[in-house]
Amino acid sequence: MTPFLRPLPTLLLAAALTTPALAQPTSQRPPENAPAPRQRPAQPKDPLPLLPASPQVKKNDALPVEKIDVDQKVLDAAVKDSIAKLLAMQEGDGKAEWPYEGVYRVNVGGQLQIPVGYRYGGTSITALALLRIPGYETDDARKAAIAKAIAFVVKAPTHPLIQEETYDAGYDVRGWAYTYILQFLIEAKTRDAIPAPLKADAEKTILYMINAINKTAIPKSGGWNYARGAGRNNPASTSTFMTPPTLLALFAAKAAGYTVDDKVIDDALNALERSRNTVTNEIVYSGEGGKNPKDNTGGAAGRMTCAESALVLAGRGSLDNVRNSVNTFITRWEEFDKRRQMSGTHVGPYGVAPYYFYFAHYSAAQAIELLPEAERPALREKCNKLLFSVRQEDGTWNDRVFKRSANFGTSFACMAMLQPVLPKPIGYTPPKKDEPKKTAGAGARAE
């Protein structure tokens, strides 16, 4: 539900520009190295009911950070206040989902709709946030909402536009559903939050998502990318936004006792290592970093924190790189804020898109917790002040022009604030050199 989108495919752009909520200047273009979305014919009728249009919201100017107070009482109150707001945002058939909304639409049955990857993935992100907020065990309202969300996402493997078997690369965001459904269900299972009648379906869905992630990894290059050239068997560049959270989902699955494909993980980690610019330490948007003296870290801070964290959690990288990524996020934060709640997607000079904003905050908060304990308080305070400087008047956080996407921003904001009290992200231990790398096949459960 993370970092999810890019400009509309050409096939859909003309229709989109007739709708004010989707309009964007035609002069705006993605970075040169960003692959263009694939043009597609209309898809079959979507079995999910069509969602209503979301009202637009205006950008609120950031407040001076020196005027922001973020003591623990303020943080606790904000998180507590977010619970009711997120519960009120649950919608769809039976009020079971929290869809993410951006400018990207797919033509399904002749209608432009929010991609189902955003609906299942966004639901998983918000459900994960509500699950992580302290007090879940005694909160019946949250239990009921999360039970609905679980019942919704376990149906994902039957959806024709989510099924791994129909994946053929191109511009396709179903991988975000794979990643966040897996993260959500693994954590829900660990916390015994899955209702008994849904446990069997949840187990099947976990296995399906592991297998889908394995099967949609990029050949040769490694990792994952929601904007590839056509053909699932063709090599493509690696997305440094999509690959780290997908790796974290696989790390959690392995720790929970599931068999993961160690070669898929190894290939993805290698791709992240190759993505680093050896001069500036920037993690490039996609592909290999190489040796480039040009400083593009103003647009790289979000992907730097998540990529460096994933590498360290797998025993690679270094804490110096993690520390540098956090400091880069803080010092170059204004470049992200310029694109918050603005129209368009990848706009110069750094190609920063609005949907990276709260994803980057969450990733920075995670990265801080990997650093030595003595360094954390000062960095937490700086990041929290930045976070509260852009809080909406209604108490939510939203990086898009769509009101609906406050569910996404508020969820990531809450999980960022909660990082000090949450378990650290789960790491990964690769097999020993003399031990064959395991492959998960159909995502079989380890005995």
Image (cartoon, helix red, strand yellow):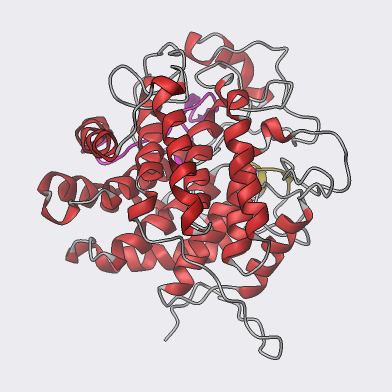
Please, which residue is most extreme toward the front here?
374
Q: Is residue 332 above or below residue 173?
A: above
The answer to which image quadrant residue 299 occupies is top right
Residue in the picture at 45% in, 75% down: 258
Q: Is residue 260 above or below residue 150?
A: below
Residue 201 showing in the rendered view: no
Residue in the picture at 47% in, 25% down: 399
Asked whether 153 falls inside the magenta stretch, the response is no
- Check the picture and name the quadrant holding the C terminus: bottom left
Residue 85 showing in the rendered view: yes
Count of all numbered marks drawn on residues in the image:
0
Give the magenta part as a residue range: 90-116
Please, which residue is most extreme toward the bottom here?
434
The answer to which image quadrant residue 325 occupies is top right
Asked whether 110 falls inside the magenta stretch, the response is yes
Question: Secondary structure of the magenta portion, mostly?
Answer: loop
Q: Is residue 49 left or right of residue 121?
A: left
Q: Is residue 99 above or below residue 312?
A: above
Q: Position of residue 313 (x, y in %)?
A: 56, 64
Residue in the picture at 71% in, 65% down: 267
Q: Position of residue 77 (x, y in %)?
A: 22, 35
Foreground residue among 202 and 134? 134
Foreground residue among 45 and 324? 324
Q: Is residue 152 left or right of residue 447?
A: left
Foreground residue among 62 and 320? 320
Q: Position of residue 183 (x, y in %)?
A: 42, 57
